[in-house]
Image (cartoon, grey):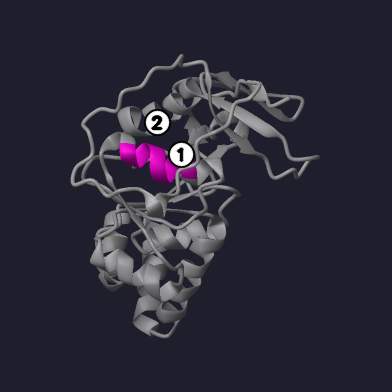
């Protein structure tokens, strides 16, 4: 609107209230634009994606109410930047909607992450494939240093049993704090070797496929339904079909349009 000036809130300067209000007073139309997230511009100039309140609600409902991936008992570690819709939705919005706890680090380093996992008993990590490749390399190097562990990993790969992997590779679980329910991977396809080995080591990796324009989920893997190499199935609010080699999607999650 002409003359509109957004109010800028600096997180570090906000007063720290003892308790937050149970319900914030809000007044908006669900089809109003809630946020504008800019695309990376990989297929042209960056474009402002106008996401409505309902676009965001549809994604939250899919993972909180539908798949029950987030609960008020979960504790998430914030690693990815919030100016991307995947971590903004998956780390902040879904966590707060479910009543879960979000842990934000002052510094992002391997040591800080590992300390936070143990200290805060983190249950869910949201990351990109590169992060899980690092986790994978660290664990596989240790497995390869032990002939017994190498044999057990081969057995676990064949059994494809999450419970067996968690039992046999208990030390790997403890290295990540001992409370991890699952890793969530997005942003790009996860290498199948990485996903398969992490599963064999007792870690459930949930993948998804989406775009900023879909706020962001189009498909995702439900807990207990991991199929290595698959990005899962469509959200309950999304219709998907393949036409002329392209993925077509429509539903409540699809953006209002591009800004200007």
Disc 2: which residue: 60
Along the viewing direction, whichever of 218 and 43 lies nearer the viewer: 43
The quadrant the N terminus occupies is: top right
- The majority secondary structure of the magenta stretch comes to helix
**In the current view of this chain or complex, which residue is farthest to the front?**
3
Q: Quadrant of residue 5?
A: top right
* Residue on which disc 1 sits: 89
The residue at 51%/15% (across/down) is 31
Q: Is residue 127 above or below residue 247?
A: below
- In the rendered image, residue 3, in percent from the top left (x then y), is placed at 63, 25
Residue 95: name its quadrant.
top left
Question: x, y percentage for residue 25?
Answer: 31, 23
Q: Are marks 1 and 2 in contact (CB under 8 Å)?
A: yes
Which quadrant of the figure has residue 212? top right
- Tell me where residue 197 appears, x and y as whole percent: 45, 63
Can you give x and y, in whole percent of width and height, for residue 75 in the image? Answer: 28, 51
| 207 versus 177 height, above or below | above
CA separation in Å, label 1 and label 2: 8 Å
Q: Is residue 187 left or right of residue 111?
A: right
Span highlighted in magenta in the image: 88-96
Left or right: where does residue 120 sit relative to residue 244?
left
Q: Name the foreground residue: 129 vs 40.
A: 40
Q: Residue lying furthest left in this view?
A: 18
Q: Secondary structure at mark 2?
A: helix
* Residue 221 within the magenta-colored segment of the rendering: no
Say if residue 69 shows up in the picture: no
SS at badge 1: helix
User: Residue 197: which numbered mark, if any?
Assistant: none
Which numbered disc flags the more N-terminal residue, 1 or 2? 2
């Amino acid at each position: 609107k002409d003359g509109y000036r957004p109010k800028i809130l600096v997180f570090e300067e906000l007063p720290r209230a003892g308790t937050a209000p149970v319900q914030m007073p809000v007044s908006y139309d669900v089809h109003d634009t809630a946020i504008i997230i800019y695309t990376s511009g990989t297929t042209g100039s960056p474009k402002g994606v106008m996401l409505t309140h309902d676009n965001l609600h549809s994604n939250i409902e899919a993972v909180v109410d539908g798949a029950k991936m987030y609960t008020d008992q979960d504790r998430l570690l914030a690693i990815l930047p919030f100016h991307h819709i995947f971590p903004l939705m998956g780390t902040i919005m879904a966590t707060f909607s479910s009543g879960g706890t979000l842990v934000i680090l002052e510094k992002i380093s391997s040591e800080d992450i590992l300390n936070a996992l143990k200290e805060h008993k983190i249950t869910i990590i949201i990351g990109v494939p590169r992060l899980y490749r690092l986790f994978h390399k660290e664990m596989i190097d240790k497995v390869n240093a032990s002939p017994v562990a190498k044999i057990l990993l081969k057995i676990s790969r064949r059994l494809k049993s999450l419970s067996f992997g968690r039992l046999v590779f208990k030390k790997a679980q403890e290295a990540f704090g001992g409370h991890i329910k699952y890793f969530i991977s997005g942003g790009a396809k996860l290498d199948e070797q990485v996903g398969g080995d992490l599963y064999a080591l007792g870690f459930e990796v949930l993948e998804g496929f989406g775009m900023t324009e879909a706020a962001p989920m189009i498909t995702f893997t439900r807990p207990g339904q991991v199929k290595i190499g698959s990005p899962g199935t469509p959200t309950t609010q999304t219709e998907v079909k393949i036409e002329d080699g392209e993925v077509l999607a429509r539903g409540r999650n699809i953006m209002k349009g591009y800004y200007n």
